[in-house]
Image (cartoon, rainbow, N blue to C red):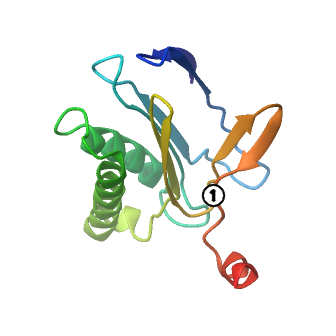
Amino acid sequence: MSGSNHTTPDNLTLDYAGLTDLGCRREINEDSMGYYPPADPSGTHLLVIADGVGGSAAGEVASRIAVEVVGKTFFANGEPVDSVHALREAMLAANRDVYSQSAQDPHYAGMATTCTCAAVKGETLVIGHVGDCRAFMALGGELIQLTYDHCMSNDYARE
């Protein structure tokens, strides 16, 4: 997944790319990603990446559901007025759908995924994040980590 899209009226360009890797320990790639352009060129661009939790059942299904539900829910009522609220609601909807599928089908019992989203409108960036799928920003030749893994060791390190 890669592309470029102008975010008018600021005449900024959003360049995006995605690459997944199976890694050394898994037989199935459990990563999913999506880019959802706005209906209006001056609207919000949504990028979503999810990494199914390895070692659990159907991580690839959980990540696919999360990406699809976030994209559909974020724009359910057209261009969001409040991207923070819309992204939060979209991620909660994805969580409910993954959990519901997990509870309904024994093949999917216990499936889970991480999810990181970026909503970009003009010069405004809103990040939604759960799990250990990190978001970075490239700025002036540097990579700046924007999110931190949700895990006990990071929680203790920040205290």
Residue plotted at (37% across, 48% down): 65
| Image: 130 above or below 7 | below
Question: Residue reaching furthest right?
Answer: 141
Left or right of 133 on screen, residue 45: left
Residue identifier under label 1: 147
Residue in the picture at 29% in, 63% down: 96
Instruction: Kindly state the secondary structure of the residue where label 1 is placed.
Output: loop
Looking at the image, is 118 positioned above or below residue 113? Answer: above
Q: Position of residue 99 (x, y in %)?
A: 33, 66
- Residue 59: x percent and y percent? 51, 56
User: Which of the pair 140/133 is nearer the observer?
Assistant: 140
The residue positioned 24% from the left and 33% from the top of the image is 79
Q: Residue at x 61, y 44 (%)?
A: 29
* Quadrant occupied by the C terminus: bottom right
> Which residue is at the front of the view, 34 or 52?
34
Q: Position of residue 130 (x, y in %)?
A: 51, 62
For this orientation, the residue located farthest to the left is 77
Identify the amino acid type marked 1. Thr
Q: Residue furthest front?
A: 10
From the top left corner, tell me how far across and down residue 156 is, in percent.
71, 85
Compared with 11, 135 (above or below) is below
67 on left or right of 153: left
Determine the image quadrant of residue 43.
Answer: top left
Instruction: Say which of 78 and 95 sits in front.
Output: 78
Neighbours of disc 1 within 10 Å: few (<14), some (14-19), many (20+): some
**In which quadrant will I find the N terminus?**
top right
Q: How many marks?
A: 1
Q: Is residue 139 left or right of residue 151?
A: right
